[in-house]
Amino acid sequence: VEKFAVSAAILSASEPLVSLGLCEARLQADARWPWLVLVPRRAGAMEIEHLSLADRAALMEEVVLAGAAVRAIGSAIGRPVEKLNVGALGNVAPQLHLHVVGRRADDAAWPGPVWGFGRALAYDPLALARTREAAMGVLGAASIKNGS
Amino acid sequence: VEKFAVSAAILSASEPLVSLGLCEARLQADARWPWLVLVPRRAGAMEIEHLSLADRAALMEEVVLAGAAVRAIGSAIGRPVEKLNVGALGNVAPQLHLHVVGRRADDAAWPGPVWGFGRALAYDPLALARTREAAMGVLGAASIKNGS
């Protein structure tokens, strides 16, 4: 039986936050947007249709929770989120993962999508700490352990 | 009470297929990709979080169904889908709607997202008929009436 692990492509672009009931919730390593990545802990899954009905329902609820966390990040850094963008692409990193991104009409890519737009901006340590704290304020209660 | 209607921005970019249990399923008017749009029939909804728990679960299942329809379109036109892309953006058209798009490594925008990429390509009548037929082969059984 194949064992679940977050793929190298996702590991290299994000950092761990928490393990939720279904997904590893990770922070995208890009300070341009409040941006979480959800990776269902199901080995071999590449499409939403590969998940069971119960897992799909759980995924939907974790998307909503991640949206609340993204909104909390935006508020904490003084840039309240105006629109959530949710995407499951996987054209570059095939392991099933969902992006939940906080958008504003004054952000660099608006109204286009963030995926493939320019280059990631590294977090500075203070902004990263503030961002993690805001995200964990929402996600912490739903955590089953520290993320991987 | 506000009455549901598909917004003008979505009407102008897509055409009706069927009404599913929750969503209006529409065909994006862009022959470059097999591409469905799902619009939940909930007046005022702009984010997934605006839907009830039951509606969110239904939406997830209609996304999976739309994925099967998109795969059927790809097969019918001789370009089998290699990866599904699912997105809820709404930066341009704020009414809640989800995109389900069939991608291939040889498509024009790969591996980038389709949203905002180039200009829509109008369907010719024969390709449109074949596309509609393939989509309806999957969606027809789940239809509650003709779409709007």
Image (spheres, coloured by chain):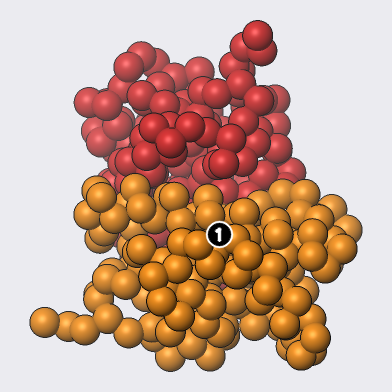
Chain colours: A red, B orange
Percent x, y of residue A99: 51, 46
The structure residue drawn at horizontal position 27% and vertical position 26%, both measured from the top left corner, is A142
Q: Amino acid at mark 1?
A: Ala
Q: Quadrant of residue A18?
A: top left
The structure residue drawn at horizontal position 45% and vertical position 28%, both measured from the top left corner, is A23
Percent x, y of residue B139: 54, 64
Percent x, y of residue A77: 33, 49
Query: Horizontal placement of B100 versus B91: left or right?
Result: right
Percent x, y of residue A139: 30, 32
Looking at the image, can residue B128 be seen?
yes
**Circle 1: element type:** helix
The structure residue drawn at horizontal position 38% and vertical position 83%, both measured from the top left corner, is B6
Mark 1, chain letter? B
The structure residue drawn at horizontal position 61% and vertical position 77%, both measured from the top left corner, is B28
Total marks in image? 1
Q: Which residue is mark 1?
A: B66
Query: Horizontal placement of A62 versus A75: left or right?
Result: right
